[in-house]
Image (cartoon, helix red, strand yellow):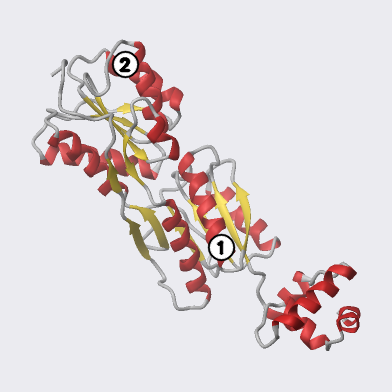
């Protein structure tokens, strides 16, 4: 720092203010100091600054899967929002969803020096009914049912599923079949429950639930089965990737979408508008989920945030060409 100060012709205090992004330095002086830093190859010591300030400007993220589109987009949104607040993100994937693995992940994040933790809890723990997080750590949980004990941010899964089913019923379909996500998923559970409750409230018959694993391949296998159901005129798929596989299976079986069977997805991934036909789906605002997770954990660090409770981010129905009134099968 002293070398930079000499080369730039300023005080060490001015160099410190520039390297830390503090105000009170003219633009000409700032450029002068930055040029000296580049010439000398100087980089501020983040570890020393962390010790001095008592914070590391880093958020830890624990997630149980990087294979699902929802988790990837939530993680991307968290990283983007964290960067806007001047924070880096340390990611720690957990291979097996058990309480011991969660505890181990928190220990490892402690060693990596993070200020707070966001947990993307998309699946149930194998050895516990609900997650138990270590005390004394500022935590926000995404996509979980732990809202009675922790701060949770989630998409309004049930509201989106209700909109999907009501859209199909309003088009004139007698009932709606459901291609659900995996049994251990919180999101899949809430979407399936809302599908069933919406049909019951409308006085409609509830068809047998068909289970997938979020992948397009599982949607394809389910589609082959649904193609053999003569009463199936409408399907609500729990995510867009399974809907993609479903569309392929129906096409191979010679069924027209939406002429024979209408299909609604969930997520509104960027590619869904390019499916054949373009997919009617439920839009999730992943950017807003990520923003609220980061702002929530930063508020808790400042001790002005909520200790527990759930914030639901609204969804919306995006109507495209994969849904229509009952056709040849009705």
Lateral position of residue 206 relative to residue 10, left or right: left
Q: Residue at x 32, y 47 (%)?
A: 157
The front one of 324 and 193 is 324
Crowd band around label 1 with a 10 angstrom C-alpha radius: few (<14), some (14–19), many (20+): many
Marks 2 and 1, the one that precedes in the sequence: 1
Q: Report whether residue 66 is seen.
A: yes
The front one of 45 and 4 is 4
How far apart are the two marked residues, 2 and 1, measured between alpha carbons? 44 Å
The front one of 312 and 26 is 26
Query: Which labelled disc corresponds to residue 225?
Result: 2
> Does residue 103 sit above or below 51 in this rendering?
above
> Does residue 216 sit above or below 301 in this rendering?
above
Query: Which labelled disc corresponds to residue 52?
Result: none
Placement of the C terminus among the 4 image quadrants: top left
Q: Report whether residue 182 is seen.
A: no
Q: Residue at x 14, y 33 (%)?
A: 171
* Most distant residue in the left direction: 203
Q: Residue at x 48, y 50 (%)?
A: 74
Lateral position of residue 138 relative to residue 5, left or right: left
Q: Residue at x 66, y 63 (%)?
A: 110
Query: Which labelled disc corresponds to residue 82?
Result: 1
Report x, y in % for residue 159: 25, 49
- For residue 250, what is the image quadrant? top left
> Does residue 272 sit above or below 217 in this rendering?
below
Disc 2 secondary structure class: helix
Disc 1 secondary structure class: helix
Report x, y in % for residue 195: 23, 38
Crowd band around label 2 with a 10 angstrom C-alpha radius: few (<14), some (14–19), many (20+): some
> Does residue 171 sit above or below 134 in this rendering?
above
Report x, y in % for residue 183: 38, 35
Report x, y in % for residue 227: 28, 15
Placement of the N terminus among the 4 image quadrants: bottom right
């Amino acid at each position: 720092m002293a070398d930079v100060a000499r080369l730039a012709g300023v005080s060490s205090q001015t160099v410190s203010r520039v390297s830390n992004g503090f105000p009170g330095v003219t633009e000409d002086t700032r450029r002068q100091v930055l040029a000296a830093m580049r010439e000398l190859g100087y980089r501020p010591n983040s570890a020393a600054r962390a010790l001095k300030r008592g914070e590391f400007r880093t958020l830890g993220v624990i997630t149980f899967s990087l294979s699902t589109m929802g988790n990837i987009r939530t993680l991307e949104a968290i990283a983007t929002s964290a960067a806007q607040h001047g924070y880096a993100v340390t990611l720690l994937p957990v291979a097996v969803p058990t309480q011991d693995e969660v505890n181990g992940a928190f220990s490892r994040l402690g060693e990596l020096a993070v200020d707070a933790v966001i947990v993307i809890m998309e699946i149930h723990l194998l050895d516990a009914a609900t997650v138990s997080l270590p005390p004394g750590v500022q935590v926000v949980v995404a996509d979980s049912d732990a809202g009675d004990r922790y701060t949770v941010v989630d998409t309004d899964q049930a509201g989106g599923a209700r909109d999907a089913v009501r859209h199909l019923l309003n088009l004139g379909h007698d009932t709606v079949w459901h291609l659900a996500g995996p049994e251990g998923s919180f999101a899949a559970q809430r979407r399936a429950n809302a599908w069933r409750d919406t049909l019951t409230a409308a006085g409609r018959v509830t068809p047998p639930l068909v289970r997938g694993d979020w992948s397009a391949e599982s949607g394809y296998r389910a589609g082959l089965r649904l193609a053999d159901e003569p009463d199936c005129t409408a399907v609500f798929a729990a995510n867009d990737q399974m809907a993609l596989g479903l569309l392929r299976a129906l096409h191979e079986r010679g069924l027209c979408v939406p002429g024979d069977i209408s299909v609604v997805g969930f997520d509104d991934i960027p590619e869904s508008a390019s499916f054949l036909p373009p997919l009617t789906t439920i839009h999730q605002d992943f950017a807003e989920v990520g923003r609220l997770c980061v702002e929530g954990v930063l508020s808790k660090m400042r001790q002005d945030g909520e200790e527990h409770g759930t914030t639901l981010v609204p969804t919306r129905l995006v109507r495209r060409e994969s849904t229509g009134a009952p056709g040849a099968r009705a």
